[in-house]
Amino acid sequence: MLRIGKLPIAVFALFIIAFPWIAHKIPPIENYTDIMIFAGIYCLITLGLSLLMGYAGQISIGHAAFYGIGAYTSAILTANYGFNPWLCMFFGMIVTAAVAVLVGAPSLKLRGHYLAMATLAFGIIVYIVFNEETAWTGGPDGMTGIPGLSLLGFAFDSVDRYYYLVWIFVFAAFIFTANLIQSDTGRALRAIHASETAAGAMGVDISGHKLLVFVYSAVLASLAGSLYAHYLNFINPSTFDLFFSIKLLIMIALGGMYNLWGAIIGAGLITFLSYEWLHYFEEFEVIVYGAILLLVTIFLPKGLAGTPEIVKTWFRK
Amino acid sequence: MEKITLAGQIFQYLITGLTVGSIYAMVAVGFNIIYNVTEIINFAQGEFVMLGGLIMVFFYAVVKLPLVVAFPATVLLVTLVGILLDRLAIRPIRQPTVLTLIIATIAASILIKGAAMLIWGKDPYDLPAFSGRNAITVFGAVIQPQYFWVIGFLIIVVIALSIFFDRTIVGKAMSACADNPDAASLVGINVQQMILLSFALSAAIGAVAGITVTPISLMEYDRGAMLAVKGFGAAILGGLGSFPGAVLGGLIMGTIESMGAGLISSGYKDAFALIVLLVVLFFKPSGIMGSIEISRIKRF
């Protein structure tokens, strides 16, 4: 579980590289490359979030806010002031990190799950701010005119080009996160998850490590938000509402929070469900999400990424 | 037309604040009951309030049952939902950790909300006030008769709960589970049953809150989450686990919200209570009436 095998990564990378080419060949799934861009953007968030839930044992119901702060920082600075998008993306990550420290530090010092409620409250506040500060954010109507991305004269202006850009970010984040898990920090996090008391007695800085993971996950969400804004060239507050935070939670629970692959699987499945496969249910898709979350929690506590383990134990019996 | 003075205005905000605060207080009490027995923060707490309001609309305004029948019938039905929540979402979890239990309550809250949307649609519903809508004017503040019903029911809930926890054997057994579930089960208390009872009880209180507030603020399917987070804020403000704290926290929370919306910005009405929640978490997480000792003992 700890070592991320090289073979699965290679297979997955090949799949990602070949995907747009395959999608072009099969007309019914031609638009799937577009959906995969969103899946990649959500993967960035769930990678950090699964570290927070699976390794630090904390729930956040406010990551939509960090996602939104990234998106709005990029949008306001590039569309209204014409700053360099990459610089704004980086600046958004710094702003988000600062905000995450402010929100996370006090509640992570306490034992238990105060972070869940603190992030829930924070998420709703930020959502209200996006709606009310019309002069900056355009209010409920949102903002238009956000420029696309380009690097050294190469514009990421087609679906395929943006797809590769997003997935390069996802791979970088995946490998960085996997290394983080195998580092001292990762060991400390696992110790904390197993027993806070024991870890504390061994001299592990519990709240410090939890905060580090929380800030890391918030920064990834901010990056995802910037990528989202530059892809759609338009944002409005409803993207960053409470339900999106819950959707992220469902992605993690479905994929499995104790394994980084879980973050990828969960984000991919839920993205395709909500963009493509659940149209039939229209607004009642919320019931489907609730049912998925409840059933997974009861029957698959380790998520889909945990199923190989279950199958293995069956065969051993 | 009488001139509206600032003092009169503030008095008005205070009255409405205390009324809304009574609702938050009831939600906070519901949080505490479940938290004390199980250490779970029940994210579906606000859905009980929403269901209370909407089911009452059905019984009272659609079926036209008399108030004295519709009220208990609604409470009973919502209590049943509380029992089902425990049976279908909490108890089936095989390796319960506080993390998975909280996720289960989040899942349940989405499901209840979705079901309510399926049944009632997205429109807000009105309920006739229990004793008419002829407002009285005191010191320039308009007071709806329904305000008295809300505050009155908070008082009834508080009295009934104190009698229950202090004077009855079941209530004492529940308090014992709250102190130490292992020791409680050693002396023969059925902890599972007490957990079930805690969900039933806090669902019932949520229903009362929903029924009494609907004539004032209407009710729709998606009100639950906001009520839950504000009620939780009230519980934290008062000190998580403390019943007097929950009531005090609720009333203060309601007053701050009402004053903030009236005097500062109505657009940020919902943000005030949440900012209070964050500030309390940051500076005094044990709340007004909670003690550090208790929060250390609790795993959660």
Image (tube, rainbow, N blue to C red):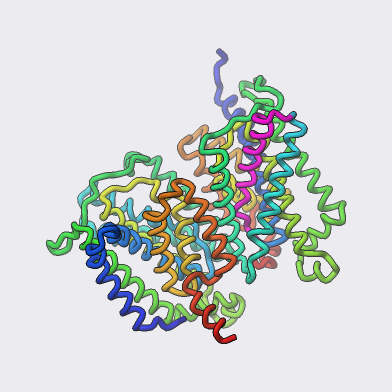
Vertically, is A291 above or below B272? below
* Residue A218: image location, x then y, percent: 41, 62
A251 lies left or right of B5: left
Q: Residue B41 lies in magenta, yes or no?
A: yes
Residue at the image position 28 percent from the left and 50 percent from the top: A75
Residue placed farthest to the left in the image? A153
* Residue range (magenta): B40-65
* Residue B103: image location, x then y, percent: 57, 61
Residue at the image position 50 percent from the left and 69 percent from the top: A303
Can you see residue A208? no
B268 lies left or right of B246: left
Q: Quadrant of residue A12?
A: bottom left
Quadrant that contains the C terminus of chain A: bottom right
Residue at the image position 52 percent from the left and 48 percent from the top: B275
Q: Quadrant of residue B286?
A: bottom right
Can you see residue B9? yes
* Residue A43: image location, x then y, percent: 37, 65
* Residue A230: image location, x then y, percent: 26, 54
Q: Residue A26 lies in magenta, yes or no?
A: no
Vertically, is A28 above or below B128? below
Depth check, front residue: A273 or B143: A273
Q: Is the magenta region chiefly helix, strand or loop? A: helix
Residue at the image position 63 percent from the left and 59 percent from the top: B89
Depth check, front residue: A9 or A143: A9
Q: How many marks?
A: 0
Depth check, front residue: B192 or B271: B192
Residue placed farthest to the bottom in the image? A316
Q: Quadrant of residue A296?
A: bottom right
